[in-house]
Structure formats: structure tokens, C-alpha cells
């Protein structure tokens, strides 16, 4: 038996979905321009689909799991289970208007809003008690104001360059989104075992990306202070240096507090600090 995973065939999530599988040690045969492919070293079959279709395929059980943006997932309202946030494909669903226009109170009231996300937009308007006209279009939403189709757009923003190039400005955020792993609700125990095997690897890769391995030298009389700064996986590793009175300390540092910690370590007497990436991290 093979686990079937659906990923986006091109666009925002494609590259990172493929690299994630690779980093999980899953080799894929010939991924370019394929409808599907499989792995030789993991029981996995990969379907390449339009992102908008992925929640449906997973709900129907045509694919067991999928990697999809929360934006698409919540727009489609399918009965699937979210297993894990992946930390890539970050973007937001936002409202934008002409950059020269003042965004005054009640601006949206009675306006025409063009979007490919009618469900999420409708929900937002209801929550905010705004009455506006939703114009659903399937692509190039950003040109709607320019051609007189709508005064407002509701679209994905990532770098913001699409808005900028079209003379628009972001005025509200409706949803923050990133890639997630979803699964069909009724997998059998064999399928679930494979999902867990895959997730175990995904989590190890994610964790590794968030952490760095750090090596440094310090005088022994400063070690207590330095240990206080370095939690490590359990506790730091300490090896004596050939030079009397000095030690080498090895540990793991989270990226979030990385630069802060480096400064504090230097101040505490650390020298020759080396920082190296971690490939996998299993705790
Ligand atoms: C979105 C959106 C914009 C662009 C915004 O489309 O419709 O065109 O990305 O990104 P930016 O802020 O970095 O310029 P996407 O490429 O996701 O295509 P899709 O919505 O058709 O899947
Ligand atoms: Zn799409």
C-alpha cells in the first residue's frame, strides 16, 4: 500500500512542498510536468493538482493527505483534518483599494468588491456587518479597480508587489495563511501509520530549520554563566580543550533568540563561536 499525497502542481507552494518531501528523505522520480509520480524509498504516491482542488480530493479520499494553503482550505470548507502547519507559503487575504483613495470609516459599505475568495469575504462582511457587492472572478483580481469592475479587491498578498504595481493599497487583513498538511477523515490503520511516519519526519525537518548547532570556547570559570544561557537538547555538551582551564561547549540554539543569545554569550566570555545548520532534529 502507498500513501497518496496531493500537492500544488505549480505556484506559491510547489517548490517548498517538493523540497520538504526531499528533506524528509523521500526521493521522487521525475517531478517536472507530471500529473503524478512516486517514490522509490518511501511508500508514497504524489498527485500534482490545482491548489483549489486539493481539499476536495482529500475529502473524497482520492488523496489521503495534501499540502495546501489555509486560504484555499478555509475558502473551500471541506471536511478534512488539519495535521500540521508548515511555516512556508505565508501570505494573507486582504482588502485593497486605490492608493490615492482615503480609507475612511464605513468605506466598504455599498462598494463592489472583486475576489476569488467569495466565501471568506462573505464571512468577513457578515462579521463586520457590512453590506457590499461581491464580484467573484477567477484570476487577475488586481486589475478590477483599473477596469472599473470594482472599487475594492479582496486578494492574496505576499510580498505586496502585485498591489504596488497596480496602484493599490492594503486596508484590511481578513486571514493570515500558510501551508498546512491536511488528511482525509477516514483513513485505515495502515494509512494512518504511514501518515505518522511522514509527519514524524516533517516535524524533525521543521524543528531542525528552527534551530542551529552552536560550538564555542570558554574559560572554565565562566561555564556556569554560559550554561545558564544555553539550554541545549538536554543540557550542553562540554569537552576540555588542550589548553588548561578552557572548555569547548556544544549546544542547540533556537533561531528566534539567536542574535540575542550570541551577544550574551560573547559578553559572558565565549570565544571562537561557530554556528552550523542542523539537518534533522529528533527529540
Ligand atoms: C496571488 C494573488 C496575487 C499575488 C500576490 O496569486 O492573486 O496575484 O499572489 O503576491 P505578491 O503580494 O507577492 O505580489 P497566486 O500566485 O497565489 O495565484 P492563485 O491565487 O491563482 O493560486
Ligand atoms: Zn489557485
Image: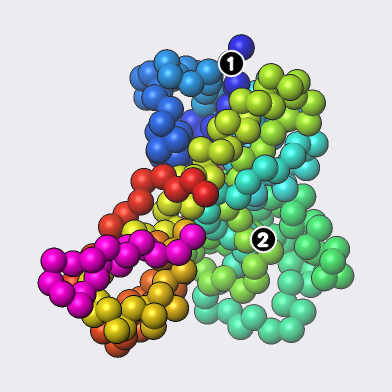
| Quadrant assignment, res 41 | top left
- From the image, state whether disc 1 or disc 2 is nearer to you: 1
Q: Is residue 64 visible?
A: no
Count residues near mark 2 (Cα–Cα under 10 Å), then give few for <14, some for 14-19, many for 20+.
Answer: some
| Magenta-span inclusion, residue 189 | no
Dot 1 or dot 2: first in sequence order is: 1
Left or right: residue 11 compared with residue 101: left
x and y percent of residue 11 in the render?
46, 41
Residue 44 vs 233, above or below: the answer is above
Q: Residue furthest left?
A: 243
- Residue labelled with disc 1: 2
Label 1: which secondary element: loop
The front one of 186 and 33 is: 186
The colour scheme used here is rainbow
Left or right: residue 159 compared with residue 97: left
> Looking at the image, which residue is at 63% across and 33% down?
196
Label 2: which secondary element: strand
Task: State which region is magenta.
Answer: 234-251
> Looking at the image, which residue is at 30% across and 87% down?
267
> Looking at the image, which residue is at 32% across and 65% down?
238
Count residues near mark 1 (Cα–Cα under 10 Å), then give few for <14, some for 14-19, many for 20+.
Answer: some
Q: Which mark is residue 175?
A: 2
| Quadrant assignment, res 23 | top left
| Magenta-span inclusion, residue 248 | yes
Residue 16 vs 161, above or below: the answer is above
Left or right: residue 189 compared with residue 51: right
Q: Is residue 248 visible?
A: yes
The front one of 46 and 259 is: 259
Amino acid at each position: 500500500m502507498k500513501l497518496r499525497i496531493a500537492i500544488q502542481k505549480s505556484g506559491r507552494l510547489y517548490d517548498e512542498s517538493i523540497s520538504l518531501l526531499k528533506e524528509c528523505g523521500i526521493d521522487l522520480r521525475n517531478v517536472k510536468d507530471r500529473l503524478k509520480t512516486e517514490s522509490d524509498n518511501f511508500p508514497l504516491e504524489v498527485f500534482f493538482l490545482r491548489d483549489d482542488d486539493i481539499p476536495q480530493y482529500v475529502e473524497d479520499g482520492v488523496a489521503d493527505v495534501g499540502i495546501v494553503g489555509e486560504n484555499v482550505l478555509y475558502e473551500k470548507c471541506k471536511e478534512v483534518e488539519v495535521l500540521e502547519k508548515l511555516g512556508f507559503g505565508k501570505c494573507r487575504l486582504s482588502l485593497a483599494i486605490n492608493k490615492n483613495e482615503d480609507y475612511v470609516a464605513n468605506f466598504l459599505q455599498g462598494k463592489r468588491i472583486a475576489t476569488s475568495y467569495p466565501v471568506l469575504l462573505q464571512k468577513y462582511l457578515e462579521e463586520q456587518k457590512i453590506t457590499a457587492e461581491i464580484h467573484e472572478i477567477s484570476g487577475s483580481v488586481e486589475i478590477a479597480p483599473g477596469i472599473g469592475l470594482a472599487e475594492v479587491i479582496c486578494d492574496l498578498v505576499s510580498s505586496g508587489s502585485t498591489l504596488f504595481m497596480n496602484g493599490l493599497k492594503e486596508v484590511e487583513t481578513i486571514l493570515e495563511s500558510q501551508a498546512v498538511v491536511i488528511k482525509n477523515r477516514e483513513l485505515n490503520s495502515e494509512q494512518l501509520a504511514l501518515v505518522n511516519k511522514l509527519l514524524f519526519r516533517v516535524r524533525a525537518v521543521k524543528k531542525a530549520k528552527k534551530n542551529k548547532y552552536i560550538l564555542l570556547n570558554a574559560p572554565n570559570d565562566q561555564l556556569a554563566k554560559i550554561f545558564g544561557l544555553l539550554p541545549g537538547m538536554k543540557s550542553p555538551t562540554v569537552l576540555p580543550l588542550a589548553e588548561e582551564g578552557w572548555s569547548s561547549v556544544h549546544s542547540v540554539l533556537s533561531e528566534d533568540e539567536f542574535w540575542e543569545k550570541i551577544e550574551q554569550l560573547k559578553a559572558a566570555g565565549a570565544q571562537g563561536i561557530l554556528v552550523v545548520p542542523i539537518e534533522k532534529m529528533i527529540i
